[in-house]
Amino acid sequence: MSSKNNNKLNIPEAREAMDKFKMECANEVGVDLKEGYNGDITARQAGSVGGQMVKRMIEDYENSIK
């Protein structure tokens, strides 16, 4: 998934892991992401992927503080 991306990560080396995480979340919500350009998906689909990513990050954090 190495498209031109202006998103900045605090740790640039994490790009590959974040791309993998994004693909996993997209699969969970039924959005067919592919490597590279994904401009053909709807805003709703993109939002559902981002929402799933946030949901999983919050769940992971909550589980880590128990």
Image (cartoon, rainbow, N blue to C red):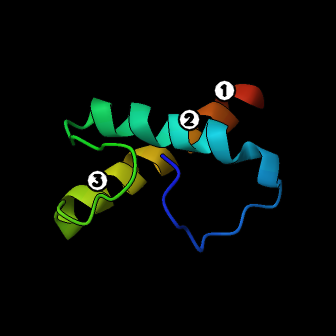
- Badge 1: how crowded within 10 Å, few (<14), some, or many (20+)? few
Q: Earlier in the sequence, mark 3 or mark 1?
A: 3
Q: How far, Cα to Cα, is label 2 from label 1? A: 6 Å
Q: Residue at x 52, y 34 (%)?
A: 20
Q: Percent from the top left, x then y, of residue 35?
A: 39, 44
Which amino acid lies under the numbered mark 1 shown in the image of this protein?
Answer: Asn
C-beta proximity under 8 Å, tags 3 and 2: no
- Badge 2: how crowded within 10 Å, few (<14), some, or many (20+)? few
C-beta proximity under 8 Å, tags 3 and 1: no
Residue in front for this viewpoint, 15 or 54: 15
Which amino acid lies under the numbered mark 2 shown in the image of this protein?
Answer: Glu
User: On the image, numbered disc 1 is attached to which residue?
Assistant: 63
Quadrant of the rendered structure where residue 58 is? top right
22 vs 38, left or right, is right
Q: Percent from the top left, x then y, of residue 24?
A: 42, 31
Q: Nearer the viewer, mark 3 or mark 1?
A: 3
C-beta proximity under 8 Å, tags 2 and 1: yes
Q: Percent from the top left, x then y, of residue 40?
A: 17, 62
Task: Kindly state the secondary structure of the residue where label 1 is placed.
Answer: helix
Q: How far, Cα to Cα, is label 3 from label 1? A: 22 Å
Q: Percent from the top left, x then y, of residue 65?
A: 78, 31
Which amino acid lies under the numbered mark 3 shown in the image of this protein?
Answer: Ser
The label shown at residue 7 is none
User: On the image, numbered disc 3 is attached to which residue?
Assistant: 48
Placement of 36 over or under 56, stated as above or below: below
62 vs 42, left or right, is right
Q: Earlier in the sequence, mark 3 or mark 2?
A: 3
User: On the image, numbered disc 2 is attached to which residue?
Assistant: 59
Quadrant of the rendered structure where residue 16 is? top right
Q: Residue at x 68, y 37 (%)?
A: 61
Task: Kindly state the secondary structure of the residue where label 2 is placed.
Answer: helix
